[in-house]
Amino acid sequence: MKNIGLDLSTACSGYSIFENGKLINYGQIKPKTTLSTIGKIEYIVKEFVNIFEKEDLTDARFTIEDIFLGNFAGKNQVLGFAGLGRISGAIMAALFLDLQKSEKDVILIKAISARPKVGLKGNCQKAEVQVWVLDKFFNKDVTEYNALIDAVIAKKGVGDIDHKTYKKRMEEISKIIEKETGITEDVADAILLGAIGE
């Protein structure tokens, strides 16, 4: 049986494909920034359909990161949520229509609920997900990344940095991990989603 994890975004969508518990393929789809939102959605859906048509999806299950509508403010975030809703709907339409999947084959789950299923905290940062993926699926030595993460967590814990600085430093660690390993936060989330579908 195959499990496919999708972390959808109009900027960059990550995917993973597992077969019988083994990660067999992963990557990301990045549309041109010059495309309109609808153009990006069209591009991403077509790319996913091309990838999936090459796979035997007879018994496949798709786990898609659901939209988290927690704290948001401002026009840009509302537009972002609208874009995520549209791309998620377009992907599900492609699954149901083009790839002949059914409701039982699609799982929608928020990141905050998905992460605890693999032993992470629901509110952990992207860098922590990347480290988990590198350790579990790529057998990488993650000691240095964990030390960086632990240092930032400790500084926040004693009040040396505020929440905004904490988030910024965790994002910087995420970028370091991406640069050194090639595992982006989108791919890491997609791999986590594929893993929980097992």
Image: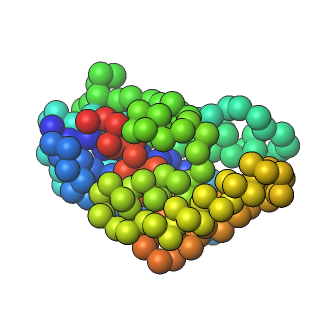
Camera sees residue 51: no
Quarter of the figure with the C terminus: top left
Camera sees residue 160: yes
The residue at the point 68 percent across, 32 percent down is 69
Q: Position of residue 167 (x, y in %)?
A: 72, 55
The residue at the point 30 percent across, 22 percent down is 104
Q: Quadrant of residue 50 in the image? A: bottom left
Is 107 placed left or right of 77 in the picture?
left
The residue at the point 49 percent across, 52 percent down is 129
Q: Is residue 82 above or below residue 128?
A: above
Q: Is residue 182 above or below residue 95?
A: below
Q: Is residue 91 above or below residue 178?
A: above
Is 120 placed left or right of 192 in the picture?
right
Q: Position of residue 39 (x, y in %)?
A: 55, 56
Q: Position of residue 193 (x, y in %)?
A: 39, 42
Q: Position of residue 123 (x, y in %)?
A: 61, 40
How many discs mark residues in the rendered view? 0
